[in-house]
Amino acid sequence: MRVDLVLANWHLFANGVWITLQLTFLALAIGFCIGLPFGLARARRVPYLSPAINAYVYLFRGTPLLVQTFLIYYGLSQFEWIRDGWAWIYLRSAWWCALIAFSLNSGAYATEIIRGAIQSVPKGDLDAARALGLRPLFVNALILIPVALRRALPQYGNEVVFMLHGSAVASVITLQDILGAGRTLNAKFYLAYEGFVTAALLYMAITFVLVAIFRGLERRYLGHLDLSH
């Protein structure tokens, strides 16, 4: 393995890591902002709103992230009214198209994670809050949502890792993320696998850190619960 070429082009992978982390964490943040109200609405079965959210969740969970990215990056550009509109400033950029696709995809998964977590909150906790005279808004803000988010940690940790790995899709629409950096290195020096091995090691290192963070959060916030049953 040509380690010397990898080290000589470290800046290529450093930039790739930066782009990957940007897309991953921005998409997760936006997806969480989508998933929290949508998950609450789904758990409460809000009339009219819940079926629409269910359709959105099914659409983005039922199709591959790669297809979603292609439809946004290549598909929307086929409409002249989009190219002539204000949104084209962003939709002509591969970075923005990737962020939109990743955010909508993450939002769909976050919706289901949060919905399940909300429905798993013991009814007694909510009854106790109501017995203290708390209004529904405060019951949700102080009891329901915090408890649900704690219970969602294991599943949401998986979503973070999946989003990190899914971000490799960005490389197929010209972005120089981690995988894109590996492909560029291989193409530039006619290498077979050095770029891919380096990319894999970087993904593994980032995943190790993320998993360690979520394991720590689970020990702190879920240590008093027995979730094995």
Image (tube, helix red, strand yellow):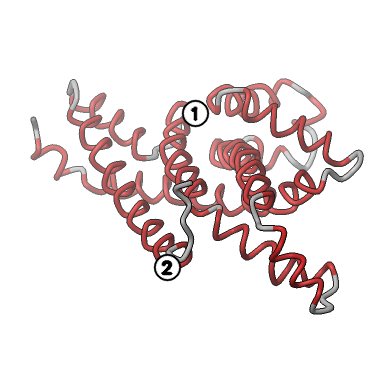
Left or right of 120: which side holds 164? left
Q: What residue sits 46% from the left and 66% below the top?
A: 224
Q: Nearer the viewer, residue 18 or 218?
A: 218
Coordinates of residue 128 in the picture (x, y in percent): 74, 71
Mark 1 belongs to which amino acid? Ile
Q: What residue sits 83% from the left and 43% below the top?
A: 45
Mark 2 belongs to which amino acid? Arg
Compared with 99, 71 (above or below) is above
* Quadrant placement of the N terminus: top left
**Residue 33, quarter of the rendered image:** bottom right
Q: What residue sits 65% from the left and 56% below the top?
A: 121
Q: Earlier in the sequence, mark 2 or mark 1?
A: 1
Q: What residue sits 42% from the left and 64% below the top?
A: 223
Label at residue 220: 2
Q: Nearer the viewer, residue 190 or 1?
A: 1
Coordinates of residue 216 in the picture (x, y in percent): 37, 62
Compared with 61, 160 (above or below) is below
Q: Is the residue marked by circle 1 packed among few (<14), some (14-19), or many (20+) residues within 10 Å? A: some
* Residue carrying label 1: 173
Compared with 74, 23 (above or below) is below
Query: Which element type, helix, strand or loop, lies under badge 1?
Result: helix
Q: Is the residue marked by circle 2 packed among few (<14), some (14-19), or many (20+) residues within 10 Å? A: few
